[in-house]
Amino acid sequence: VQLQASGGGLVQPGGSLRLSCVVSGFTLRSTTIAWFRQAPGKEREGISCVRGGDNNKAYADSVRGRFTISRDNAMNTVYLQMNSLQPEDTAVYYCAAATRNLIRSSMFAIRSYDYWGQGTLVTVSR
């Protein structure tokens, strides 16, 4: 089982990036895939996730309305479209997988996830 995150980079405030998480070893339909991020000196936080069984999606307040999670079952890939990026979005972004459909109260709990990708750095700066 592997998760490969990519798509990070340097972007100016107000700009956009799309992160990708390619999942191998299991199918998306029976999993919950989440994006977490960790800024320097801060704890890792869950920001968005999508549940495989019913495509239910969730967003943290800090990104709702700016970020959009989506998945391509055929490609076994989950995307995070990030718009209107701000300096406070600067962090290492991780994708994570839980090999079951999580209930809402567990979706942003680190302990809910069984597998993690390696992280991709997003820097928002002029």
Image (tube, grey):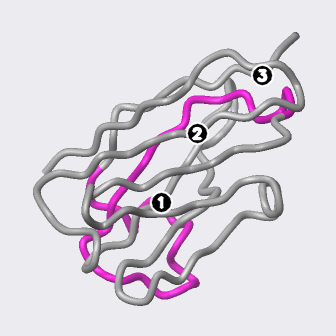
On residue 18, the disc is 2
- How far across and how far down the image is residue 76, in percent? 26, 58
Name the residue carrying label 3: 124
Tag 3 and tag 2, C-beta contact below 8 Å: no
Which mark is drawn over residue 34? 1
Numbered range of the magenta stretch: 86-115
Separation of disc 3 and disc 1 at Cα? 21 Å
Residue 41 coordinates in the image, percent (x, y)? 69, 26
Q: Which mark is first along the chain, 2 or 1?
A: 2
Screen quadrant of the C terminus: top right
Tell me which label, 3 or 2, sits earlier in the chain: 2
Q: Residues within 10 Å of mark 2 (few under 14, many from 20)?
A: some
Could you tell me how far apart the alpha carbons at marks 3 and 2 are, in whole angstroms? 13 Å
Q: Magenta segment: does it hold 88?
A: yes
Q: Which label was assigned to residue 17?
A: none
Q: What residue type is labelled 3?
A: Val
Point 56% across, 30% down: residue: 92
**What is the count of numbered marks?**
3
Q: Which of marks 3 and 1 is nearer the N terminus?
A: 1
Locate residue 17: give its quadrant. Answer: top right
- Horizontal side of 79 relative to 58 (left or right) equals left
Question: Closer to the observer: label 1 or label 2?
Answer: 2
